Image (spheres, rainbow, N blue to C red):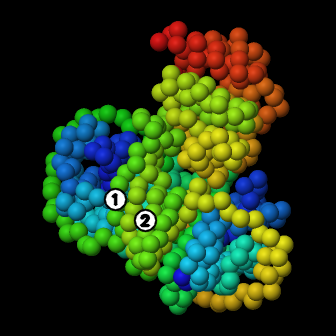
């Protein structure tokens, strides 16, 4: 089985995001970048499928040179090959990224394309659906369970307050949600092996896109409210405040 | 600017976000129509009229009884073109997020996901969307002729505004579906999802173990709330991941968020600090959660929560 996993490098979840002085961009100094957590589930699923069916796992990522460290993390888990689509930065419009990824994916003739359900930086949650239309392939998003028998895929996806069981056939695109599997840690051997793999670099001219970020701002700061009390005896007063002041219960 | 609102429905019920989007369209003061895709859906017109929809368009085909992302995307894109809509409004729900980008790809229309503010700016839209799970807000513009906007549930509250709705039915074509839903497995009976809930009671590491979760569930039950959890509680295997609130879980904006035994790691705060009111119950006065809480009780949750349950029961 020939599998591609599209990954993104993102700031880790503990990062306090700082903006540049003009509020036009995120200040990248002091950011610890990681492999997008949802992409780890995608990589793990690809590796499990490879272990079961043989084949090859290719990691594909778009972005500036720093993203090669996220690519190495995925390789260290056990992926075989990697393609880095060079770009000065991540495009603001996910459709631009989708177009570039689709061009590379078309060349690879993959049976299965996996990715995380969302990147935790820009949170667009669009990539799997965009790729599906670009490549004219079936896609299932937010997948927590995946079964493949021959060409037939049965995937369980999470929807608000319920699950859907979706059927389609290979080749297909699957967007992984937490719960799909338990991603492995890279072994020391895996890390050493990953260092030796040549990452194929691709230069590509990217389109301009149709989503413009006018400016970034910090969310309105919530000021600390009142401490109603320091024991369970404060409960009646808390409930009164919620009922009469906040009017939410 | 003509707006088309996609009516989301599941198992015979319109999702609340649809009414919220109708209210939003009315606030924007722009002409709008509601689009319903499905098989047996005519009865939805009256419900939509209750919130002020004056025109409801049905795109019907028996094949649409089953959800298919590719199949639905095609017919929605067709409807956007047929109706001459400039803006497609959807909910930032699992369905909206699944479908929106596909419709965008078909129509070469840009999409803004999970908007928390939609404003008119001349004949353009000014949109606000949280990024990094809410650590920053981006003010954005879509420059494509057709714009797709998904709106976060609970941000605009649906307001009843009875109107009489004209209806129009189109016998829509259904292409061969590539992916199709065979079954819906409902969650625990009556279980409310955190993204749609008006009140959330959420538990964290301070709960000490899954065996104590009846406290969260009982309190939630009395308040008609959904139950949530911190990443620590989910990582420990105490709660299912679909309850997780935070940057690697769900971002929520309820009217009331009650954080029980949650210290307030930055990635959790990002996911819930846009709640209208926050209550924190934690015995550590230094816990960061108190920095965003409107009301706090610094005490042992195992004393506070049972007391809340008792007080609420005596009031009911």
Q: Do labels 1 and 2 touch, CB within 8 Å?
A: yes
Q: Residues within 10 Å of mark 1 (few under 14, many from 20)?
A: some
B25, above or below A146, in the image: above
Quarter holding residue B186: top left
Identify the mark at residue B182; answer none if there is no mark: 1
Chain letter behind tag 2 = A
Q: Residue at x 80, y 86 (%)?
A: A196
Left or right, residue A194 beside residue A143: right
Q: Is residue A204 left or right of residue A234?
A: left
Q: Which residue lies at the image location 71% right of the left edge and 10% below the top edge?
A: A233
Q: On screen, A14 above or below A51?
A: above
Rendering coords of residue A236 (x, y %): 63, 11
Task: Kindly identify which residue carries mark 2.
Answer: A154
Give left or right: position of B202 versus B87.
right
- Quarter containing the N terminus of chain A: bottom right
What's the distance in space between the residues labelled 1 and 2, CA to CA?
9 Å
Q: Residues within 10 Å of mark 2 (few under 14, many from 20)?
A: many
Question: Residue A102, percent across and down?
Answer: 51, 82
Query: Which percent across, then down, holds residue B56?
Result: 22, 50
Chain for disc number 1: B
């Amino acid at each position: 089985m020939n599998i591609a996993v599209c990954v993104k490098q993102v700031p880790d979840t503990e990062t306090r995001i700082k903006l540049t002085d003009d509020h036009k961009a995120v200040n990248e100094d002091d950011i610890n970048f990681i492999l997008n957590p949802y992409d780890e589930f995608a990589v793990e699923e690809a590796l499990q499928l490879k272990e079961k069916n043989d084949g090859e796992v290719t990691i594909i990522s778009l972005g500036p040179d720093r993203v090669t460290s996220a690519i190495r993390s995925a390789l260290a888990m056990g992926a075989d090959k990697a393609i880095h689509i060079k770009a000065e930065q991540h495009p603001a419009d996910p459709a631009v990224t989708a177009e570039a990824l689709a061009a590379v994916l078309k060349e690879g003739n993959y049976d299965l394309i996996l990715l995380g359900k969302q990147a935790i930086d820009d949170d667009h949650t669009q990539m799997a659906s965009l790729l599906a239309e670009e490549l004219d392939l079936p896609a299932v998003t937010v997948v927590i369970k995946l079964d493949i028998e021959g060409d037939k895929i049965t995937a369980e996806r999470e929807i608000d307050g319920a699950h859907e069981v979706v059927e389609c056939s290979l080749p297909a695109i699957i967007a992984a949600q937490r719960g799909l599997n338990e991603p492995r840690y890279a072994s020391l051997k895996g890390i050493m092996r990953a260092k030796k793999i040549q990452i194929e670099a691709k230069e590509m001219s990217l389109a301009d896109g149709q989503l413009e970020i006018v400016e970034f701002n910090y969310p309105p700061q919530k000021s600390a409210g009142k401490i109603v009390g320091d024991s369970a005896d404060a409960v009646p007063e808390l409930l009164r405040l919620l009922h009469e002041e906040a009017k939410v219960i | 600017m003509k707006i088309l609102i996609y009516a989301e429905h599941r198992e015979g019920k319109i999702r609340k976000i649809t009414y919220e989007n109708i209210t939003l369209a009315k606030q924007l003061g722009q002409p709008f129509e509601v689009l319903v895709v499905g098989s047996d859906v005519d009865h939805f017109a009256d419900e939509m009229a209750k919130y002020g929809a004056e025109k409801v368009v049905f795109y019907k085909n028996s094949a649409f009884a089953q959800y298919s992302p590719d199949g639905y995307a095609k017919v929605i894109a067709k409807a956007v073109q047929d109706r001459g809509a400039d803006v497609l409004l959807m909910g930032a729900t699992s369905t909206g997020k699944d479908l929106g980008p596909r419709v965008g790809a078909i129509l070469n229309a840009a999409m803004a996901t999970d908007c928390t503010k939609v404003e008119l700016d001349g004949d353009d839209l000014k949109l606000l969307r949280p990024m990094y799970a809410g650590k920053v807000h981006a003010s954005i513009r879509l420059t494509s002729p057709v714009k797709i906007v998904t709106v976060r549930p609970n941000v605009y509250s649906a307001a009843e505004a009875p109107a009489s709705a004209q209806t129009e039915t189109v016998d829509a074509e259904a292409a061969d579906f590539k992916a199709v839903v065979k079954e819906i497995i409902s969650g625990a009976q009556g279980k409310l999802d955190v993204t749609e809930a008006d009140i959330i009671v959420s538990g964290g590491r301070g709960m000490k173990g899954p065996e104590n979760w009846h406290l969260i569930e009982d309190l939630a039950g009395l308040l008609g709330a959904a139950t949530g959890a911190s990443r620590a509680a989910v990582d420990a295997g105490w709660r299912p991941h679909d309850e997780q609130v935070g940057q690697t879980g769900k971002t929520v904006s309820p009217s009331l968020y009650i954080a029980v035994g949650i210290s307030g790691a930055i990635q959790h705060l990002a996911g819930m600090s846009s709640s209208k009111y926050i209550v924190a119950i934690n015995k550590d006065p230094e816990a960061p959660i108190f920095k965003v809480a409107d009301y706090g009780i610094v005490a042992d949750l195992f004393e506070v929560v049972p007391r809340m349950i008792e007080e609420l029961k005596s009031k009911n």
